[in-house]
Structures are given as structure tokens and as C-alpha cells.
Amino acid sequence: MSLGVNDRPDPGLPASEPPPAPLKARGRVLPSPISGQELVLIAVIAVLWVILAFATPAFFTAGSIQPLLVSTAPIALVGIGMTIIIITGGIDVSVGAAIMVCSVITAKLLVDQGLSLPLAVLVSVIVGALLGAVNGLLIAYGRVHAIIITFGTANVFLFLGLQIFGSNTVNGIPQTFDFFGRGVAGRTLGIPHAFLITIIIAGIAWWYLRHTAGGRHFYAIGGDAHAARLAGVRVQRRILLAYVITGLLVGLGSCFVIAQGTSTLDQSVGTGKELAVIAAVVIGGTSIMGGRGSVLGTLLGALLVQTVTSGVTQLGWNSQLSDLFVGIFIIIAVGADLIRERARRAT
Amino acid sequence: MAAPSSADEAVATPDSGLARLHLTGISKRFGAVRAIRNADLTVKTGQVHALIGENGAGKSTMIKIISGVESADTGRIEFEGAEVSISSTTEAMALGIATVYQEPQLFAELTVSENIFTGREIRKAGRVDWAAQNEKVVELLELLGLPGKYATVAVGSLSIAEQQQVSIAKALAGNAKVLILDEPSAILTDAEIEVLFTVVRRLTASGVSVIYISHRLDELFRIAQQVTVMRDGQTIGTYDIEDLTVRQMAELMVGGILSDDRPERVVPDGEPALVLSGLTRKGKFHNVDVQVKRGEIVGLYGLVGSGVSEIAACIYGMDRATSGQILLNGEPISPRSPQDAQKLGIALLPANRKLEGMFSFQSIAFNISAGHLKLLSRFGVFMDRAREKTVAQDMIKRLAVKTPHERQAIGAMSGGNAQKVVLARQLVERPEVLVLAEPTQGVDVGAKEEIHRIITELAESGSAVLVVTSDLPEALRISDRLQVVRGGTTTVEFGPEATQVDVLAAAAGAVDEKGHAA
Amino acid sequence: MSATVTDNAPAQDPKPKAGPAAESLGSRLLRALLTQRIVLLSVLIVVVVVVFFIMDSGGYLTAPYDTDYMSSSLINAVPLVMLGLAELLVILSGRGGIDLSVGAIVSLAGMVFGFAYGQWGWPLWFAIILTAAFGGLCGALNGFLVAYIGFPALIATLATYYAFKSLAIVINSQRPISTPPIQELFSITRSVELPVIGGQLPNVPLGIFTFLIPTVVVVWLLLARTTYGRRLYATGTNDVAAKWSGLPVRDTRFKAYVYAGVISGLVAVVTVGQFASARPDAGVSGSGMALPAITIAVLGGVAITGGIGRVAGVVLATLLIVWLNAGILLAFIGNEGSQYQLLALGSVLIFAALLNGITNRRYGGSR
């Protein structure tokens, strides 16, 4: 028996709403899978690509789109983990240093032990997970602000990485990782493997965040960690998991980085990557305050940043200008988000 | 009508067999303060049991004990006949005790469905079974009178009233056997209250027990079967609701003692210093008319949700009225910020000391001077610390703040002392108009007396004082005139001869044309 | 009316677990050590210096760790303290205040200085004032985004970090400015003998007197003695209460970022002098200057949530790190030393942060 809902003035619904029939839960059960911010990003990227295609005929060729996708991959991949971290209200500025550690260990093993690709990837991923666990434990159980802890671990990881480097570079890295690289071996049907793998993992993450209890709990923690705990969410374990996942992705991403490099690995690998990843996440619409965000946005954010970088190079402009554009895009993206939030709260 | 008098004559509690929740001899202390003494409460299956009492009578502590937030020092709790100890919220929830607070603890970005099921999601093969979850949610929503399509709407986009209903749904989803509603009608419109009552009736029909806390005594007749009155930490008695009138309930809450020791005060004549005329802020309050003369203390008494604190914020420039006027000494003003208000000579003591008044780990001197930096400085730039120190010490003496020196951090002080410090901030420069919001909330008796003394002194020195409070004895004790604010507007006005019972009844809505309790 | 019994959860704040009267001397000392950051830092400085003196006399170091060395290593303290103070101001303002762009401002302002002094031939003082003002302008952009628009500080300063960094490199097409006037500036980094007592004491880098001490004094005055300082602490402690008290919250926050920018501008001048060249990547090479600055501030006792922090803490934290780093440099051969400095910086930061966490729980906060 339904209530006389018609009798009640309901400010929430438009006036013409008929009394709801018993609702079968079919069709969309969650809010739209794609947000306004992401649609705008797709539009912006499309526009940029069109402009670049006209400005430099070379842009819209496989020869330039493929490297673009390959370069996007590591940032987007790590960005998936960073998205989860930021959704829970945390942050991780140590991923750049972590990439360095994973890269140098893996590269050395490739050179010295001649490991096969699967084994090398496994090692890299495990190392990354360990580093992530360090962060996760300190943040989840130490009750200290994530930004400070990860500033600290960034330095410690840098130290580790430099120690492992020993001399300045690692030379003679074999072709093992070509599967992830820019060359012909790195593609199937024209699509770079690195990019494909990233898309697949992003898809899994997207599904996990939307359709599992654990995934939704990340959002709950970011929304109100205290209320989440009261509701029975295992807050500390979830936070630890977020950093470990990121660590795993850092490990895999480091393999991509090695693949995209030369046979020489430099000590500067990973420098500044954490900022690029955070920029991608933020441009993608994930709120730094936590509780809201999606990996699709991060993918698009990473693609946008890479498009800008690549475009600037192709247009023959000073490559440093790409940083300027990234900064401007961050302002625009977050600013738009702020305005939307404010408008939503005012109603 | 039965004239209730003491706890001994309370309606006998039924057999424990019918009682779902049975508390006896409950006591609880917080430090030196005894919040509850030897209280009893019995809630039957399928019953709506109202719990009433003045602020500070012990209701919230009782609820906290039942819901596991606090543990009783003494006493016995029986749940469905068996003795239990409720030492955590998880244990309470496991028993089936659910509480819906005034502040909904929801995740704004998640959907209603997710909010209700966070922590106990329905799963199917590893993933959340949205269909099953949503079906249940739609059932619950329809039970509560919300449209089923809300299941997939983000909670943050719902109105506060709707969010409250989602909180109730959340409590119900856990198969609650005892549902505690803490002042649910405070933020609801009349129509929404009707819906709430229908829901409550349905719940009790299916056997859920509801503990209903409210200040709106007239409502209780429509929804409750029994009412327990608390006063000064004790349960005075439990009565069948049809045996009481609003006036009798008020008398029980108050203890039949009229306001006393009001010192004779002569209010000087003259034009009012502060006039609110037809003041309206869309959605918050409307047609508010208040006048305060110099040297006069006017009280505004209103319960939560009455709009009374928003009126105070408006006078102080924290919010802007949509229509109506504020006149200061005859001149219309429209302060757009607290800075504007202060320049005009209006000061305000905020209602929520911790959130809005205190700079917790700073010193007393810092707290006092925070609003007067220009005054206590040279050229407006360099702090005149000697002067600051003198002012602080003067204030400490004047307000009898218990502290060794002005450098002590305010965070470690008792509520009463801290409140005096925040009050001192408003008094450094004698304000034309002083608005005090909940001036003695969480303050011990001694400090309360002293704060009242200071307020009276201030009025005598020529300021116009407006006291906005939900503490009725205080409102009566200190005001020359008392206006009741209800439903967003000023209603009945009482003079010095008013009784607590009258005012309480007026605030609850049961008054006749003469303003006497029905 | 009988006594009103307070009903809600105790309005009294929970008393600190260790009541002072009942404490032994030992636990009182421990409490002072943990809650008074100044005390802890001083103790650690002494420990570090003593350890290195011992290592020196035991012959473990590659060069003497003596007061001369300690004094000359202070040249590194100059930019570090100043940027640490810049971060102090910004973090004090509350609501997640932080500035990731200070290093980029240093680079960009450094280029401006290079143009003004090295190419356009401006007098030194004018050039310095211009550079500081330009830094303030950069800070104003940060302040505007954070205080008036409402950007989270992390995001806004991340964006301006990118923007300023790239502008610094682009405006002179990636070339540094090393004209003769700039090169002569190197003399400002020399060490001087102190007047009168100089014979006894080691020589002190000039930068300490020309830049570090004035900045420390000015910031200290600002925070401890001016009305602005009060407004800043109030805003950082509780910006809602600050608003109710009639304080201009947005304006106060905005100014914090401006002042941080001005200080960064001054650091730019120091850096140009140190390198004898205006380098476009001055503040952003390696992991940049922002990270050490934030580390210093946190180590110095600044609360990341705002409202807590003192100049003395920042100064002592810098001394600790500088002398620790100086010793590490001597304890290892070649590049190893600079790597161990990273380890030291990182571990010290984590240790300080965990300490903050513990003292907050056990003692209800620190100062």
C-alpha cells in the first residue's frame, strides 16, 4: 500500500511527477558512469586533436599518435592508483621516487640476470607493492597526514634508488620490454600494448570502484571516514590497500618507462612524475577533498596532458610551454569543478 | 485528569514480558557532573514512547547509554527480557537499537541506496547486487513516503528533511527493534511531520519500538502512547499520554517551581536602540518583530529549528535578510559582515563555543583581543602587548575567570571559564547592542550566575541586550521581556511575570489568545 | 530553579592524561621534550654536533668537522630558512595551506633579477626590490586562487608551479644570465669576519647578515608583534571563530601567500649570487626547493592544519638539517654523502610527523 505521496508538497521533484509505481530496479542503478567533467575533457581533447591535425599534418598519423598513447600509459596507469588514493582523501607524492626505485632494480636485473619479461614485471610489481605498503602502513596506522609522510618516503625512496644505481647509469638494457615499447614489437593491430594494458586495468578498476562493496567503501572513507568506520567499513585496511594498489601499478608503470627509454637508464628517471600523475587525476575531475572521482577522468586527464606536451613539440614551440599549459588546464579544470560544486550546493 | 506528582505514582511498568527495553537504576557521571541519577525507562514492544525534559535534564545522556555511545555507571539494562550490557555502538546495533540524530551521518556523494547499505552490502558473486539492494531500498523509501527513484540519487542533493528520512531508512534497514528519534520534527515542515508520523505508526504496527524525543509537547499527543519526563537527571515518572495535558507536562518538566530571584530591574524609557521590523530571510524566518531599548534585556526563546539562531546571525551581518528592516538608534542598517556589525557597535557571542567562539590552543589574552586588534595596537599595526595584558587582566577580574594568568591556553579550561573568556571578547569595547546566543550552554551553575550578573551589569551601563536561548529558566530569569520564536517568526511576548510553564507551552504551540497554556 | 545538570558530553575538555602535579622529574622532562618542539630540536642539534665532533676526533671524517666548517656550511641555511619561513606563513593560514610553487617562483624571479641587474643595468637595490615585488606578485596569484576563489592550496600551487617553472625557462629561451655584474655578485656569498669579536669566532657567510637575519627578524616581528600576525594565527586556528570575531579571513590568507612570494623573490637573489648566474631551473632542479622548505617547517613544529608554528622552530630545524647534512657530507666519500642527506631528510620528516601524531594523542597537542 503506498502512501498518499501526492498529498505531500515535494520540493525535490518537478511538479509534473506522477506517483511512482513500484519500481523495478533495472537500468541505471548508480549515477551516470560519465560525468560532466569527463564529457568536457573528451570534447577538449577532440578539439585539440583537430586543431593539431590542421596545424601539423604530421600529427594525425600513426607515427605520432602511437608514441602519444605509449607515453600516456605510465602516467595513466599510476594515475589509476592515485585516483583511488585521492578518493579516500589521501595523496602520494612519492610515486616519482618509487618509479625510480622499481626501474633501477628491474633494469639491473634485466642487465645482470637477463630475466624474462614476466619475471621482470613480477619483480617490479612486488617491489612497487612493498614501497606502497610502507606508505600505506604509516598513513593508515600512524595517523599522520598523507602529504607529509609521502614527502618523507619520497626522500627515502630516492636514497634507496640512488644507492642501488651505484654509478650514474644502468647501461646495456636488453630489448626484453619491447613488448611495452614504442617500436613495432610494442603494437598489435596498431594499438600500443602499454596503452591497451592500461585501458584494461583501468576498466577493471572502474568496475571495482563502481560495483563492489570494497570499491564503494573508498568513496565512503573519503566522504566521512568517521561515519564510515561507524558503518562497519574497515577504514585502515582500505587505506592500506589503496597505497599498495598504487605501488603495484607503479611497478608495472616502471616497466613501461624502461621500455620507452633507451638502453641506458638515467638517475633522473621518475623525477617530477608524481606531479604529472596528480595533475592528470585532478584535471580528470577527481576532487582533492576526497569522496568523489573516477578513473575515466584520470585517463582523459593523462591523455590531455600528453596531447599538450606532444602538440607543443610538434608545433615546434618551446617544449617548456607544455608545463605552462598543464598549469592552466589544472586551473580551468579544478575551477570548473569548484563552480559546479558551488552551484549544486546553492540549490 | 490524573495529577501526576512524584515518581512513586508513575504508571506501573508492565510485565517485563511486554517490555522490549527496560532500564532501571541508571546513573552516569561526567567528571564532577552527575548527568543521570537513578533513572528508569521502560519501552514496550510496538510502542511510541516519548522522552521529554528541559535541556540538561538528562535525555541525551540516556539516549547515549541506550545506543552504546556511553556506558552507564550503575543500573541494569534488559532487552527483551534478558540482561544485556551495551558497551559499544556495534553492540547496540547488533541488538537492533538504531538512533537517528539531528545531524544525518551520510555520505553526500553516494546514492541513497549505497548510504543505506554501506557496511552491509548485498553481494552476488563478488559484486554488489544493485538490483536486490535497490529493491529493498525502494521498499524502505516508499514506506517512508519518499519516491522510489531516490534510490539512485546522490544523498547530497536531497533536502535536509529528506536526508533525515534516509537516515531513518538506514536505521530500519538494519532491522531495528528499537528506533530512537532525536528531535526529528525540529527541521520538518508540518506536512513532512505528517509523513513522519505515518511512517512511525507503520513501524510500531509491525512491532518496532520507538523512543521519541521532542520539545514539541503538542505533537506528542498525535504520536506517542506513553511519555517519560526527566528533570535534573532523574526520571520523574512515566505516564500514559492521554492522562496529561501540555500544561501538566510542562509543569512536570519544570518541577512546578516558578522563576524566582529575579532582581527588580528598572528599564529606562526611551526610543528602542535596536528594532527588527518585518525581518525576513527566505527559508529561515519571516516577519520577525523585536524591539530592544537601551538598558533593556530582551529574550528570544525558541527551540531548534525555530529560526532563532538565524535571526541573530542576520543582525550580526553573517547572513542577509531578504526583506524587512533592522534599525539601530532609528537608522536603518544592513551589515554585510561581522566587521560591519562591529563597526556599528553590535557585538555577538556565538552559540557554539567550540566551533564559533574559541581559538582553542591560544591564550586567554589572545582570545580576548582577537576582535579588537586595532584598538590594542599602535598605528593599527604593532600589538600593544602591555595594553593587551592589562585589558585581559581586567576582564579576568571583572568576569571572575578562574585562571592563574592571562597566558593560559583556553582549550584546557572548563566550559564556564572558556565561555567567560569568549564573552569578555565582546565586552572590551562596550557595545551598543550585544546579542548573546546560548550564553550559558554547557556552563556550570556558578559560572552561569556570574555570566548573568555580567549581562545585567552591561544592560545597566546602557547597552541593549538581546539574549537568544533555548534554556528557558535562563530566558525567564534574565529577560525584562521574553518573546517566543516558533516556526520562523516571533509570536507571543511575555513580561516579567511569565511562568516557565506558560512559555514552554507557548513554544510548544498550545496557547490560547491570552497567551496562557491550554 | 535547582541546579542545571550539564547534559551533553562534558563541556570540559578532557584533561591531559598526565596531571602535572603527580609527575616525576623524568616524565616531566620527557613531556617537555615531546611537546616543546624548541626543546627537542635544541637537544637534537647538540646530539648531532657532538656525534660529529666525536667522529671527527676518531678520524672517521674526510675533513674536519669544526666550528669553521659549521660556520661556512651556514651558507646553505640562508635559502632554506627563508623558504621555510615562507612555508610557515602559508601553512599557518590554515585550511590545508601549503605552497608547492616557491621553488618555481625562485626560478622565475631569479630570471627577472637577472634581466634587471645583469642586462638592463639597474642599480642593485632597485633590482632587488623589483625581484621581491615580482615574487610578491606571483604569490598574489596563489593567494587569489586560494583565498578568494577557494582552490585547495595544493592544487593552486601545483598549477602555478608548472606555470612559473615553464615561464622561467621560456623567457630567456632556456639560457641562464651570467653577465659580469651577475658574476661579481658571487662576492655576496663570501664569508666575513665578525667585527670586534671576529678574531675568536669563525667567519660567517655574508648572506647570513644581509638576507637571513633580516628575514628572520622581520617574519618574527610580523608573527609575534603585529596585528597581522594575530589575524594569521586566529585564521589558522579556527577560521570560523575568526569570522565571527570580525577578522578578515580571506584577506589574511591572501597576504600570507603574497609574503611567501616576496620571500621567494629574495631567495632568488641569494641563489643568483650563489651560482653567480641566473639559472632558469634554479629552484626546481632535482626535487625542487619546496620539499625541503616544507620539511623544515614541519620539523620546526608547524601543524599542517594551521594555527601552530613558530619562527624559532623553523630556524632551529634548519640548523639541525644543515649541520646534519654538513656532517653527512664529510662522513661519506664522493656522491654517497648527498644521497645519505636524502635519507636523513626523509627519515627526520617522518619521525617529526609521527612525533606530532603521538604528542597530539597523549598530551593533547604540542607547541
Image: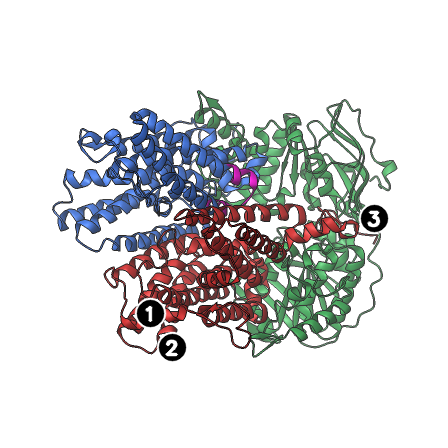
Chain colours: A blue, B green, C red
* Disc 2 from disc 3: Cα separation: 79 Å
Residue B154 horizontal/vertical position (percent): 45, 39
Residue at horizontal 58 percent and vertical 71 percent from the top: C225
The reply, left or right, for residue B426 in relation to residue A234 is right
Q: Chain of mark 1?
A: C
For residue A211, what is the image quadrant?
top left
Q: Chain of mark 2?
A: C
Any magenta on residue A140? Answer: yes
According to the picture, the residue beneath numbered tag 2 turns out to be C125
* Disc 3 from disc 1: Cα separation: 78 Å
According to the picture, the residue beneath numbered tag 3 turns out to be B255
The residue tagged with tag 3: helix, strand or loop?
Answer: loop
The residue tagged with tag 2: helix, strand or loop?
Answer: helix
Q: Chain of mark 3?
A: B
Q: Which of disc 1 and disc 2 is earlier in sequence?
A: 1
Dot 2 amino acid type: Trp
According to the picture, the residue beneath numbered tag 1 turns out to be C113
Q: Nearer the viewer, residue C222 or B143?
A: C222
Q: How many marks?
A: 3
Residue at horizontal 59 percent and vertical 30 percent from the top: B172
